[in-house]
Image (cartoon, grey):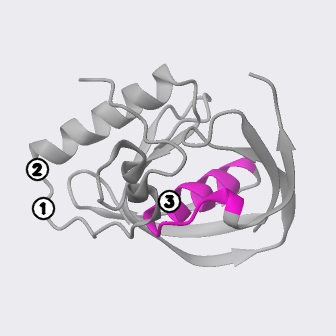
Amino acid sequence: MAIRTIRTDNDPVLRKVAREVTVFDEKLEVLVEDMIETMHDADGVGLAAPQIGILKRVIVFDLYDDEGPMALINPRIVDQSGIQMEEEGCLSLPGRHGIVKRPLSVTVQFEDVDGESYEIVGEELLARVLCHEIDHLDGVLYIDKQIVVEEKAE
């Protein structure tokens, strides 16, 4: 496993659309392991592959609960409901935070590292994390959706 460099600010890779994963192999497993290690090293709760310069539809997250870290390959939101407006930050935009409107609940279909299909329902914080990371796969940053900008000292 290795800690990868997180792309920041105006890196053009953050604005590109990631490609669907079609090969589920050892390279994908290594990518997921590296992403989890990188996310933990940066004290993040989520990370998308484009944030480390890889244009693949892969996200990882860890809400630091009993579930532990999870990896979602080719995630897609298939249902959403409710509204929440909360503060968000991003490992790719250090020192910046803003209030963003997101669904309160989302249903996401995805594959695991072996290519098996699953579905997850995220509520509140998990819904926010899923939406935030899936946005990265489409070249969208939270600052594109923020309602209120807050600069914070590091």
Counting residues from the start of the chain, the first of labels 3 and 1 encountered is 1
Residue holding disc 1:
23
Question: Which of these two is toward me, 81 or 88?
Answer: 88
Residue 136's label in the rendered image is 3
**Residue displayed at 81% across by 50% down:** 98
Q: Amino acid at mark 3?
A: His
Residue farthest to the front? Answer: 10
Is the stretch drawn in magenta largely helix, strand or loop? helix
Question: Which of these two is toward me, 11 or 78?
Answer: 11
Quadrant, the N terminus: top left
Looking at the image, residue 17 lies above or below residue 114:
below
Looking at the image, residue 13 lies above or below residue 95:
below
Q: Is residue 65 left or right of residue 112?
A: right
Residue 25's label in the rendered image is 2
Which residues, given as a range, are shown in magenta? Answer: 125-143
Quadrant, the C terminus: top right
Badge 1: how crowded within 10 Å, few (<14), some, or many (20+)?
few
Q: Is residue 65 left or right of residue 54?
A: right
Looking at the image, residue 129 lies above or below residue 100:
above
Badge 3: how crowded within 10 Å, few (<14), some, or many (20+)?
many
Residue 141 figure quarter: bottom right
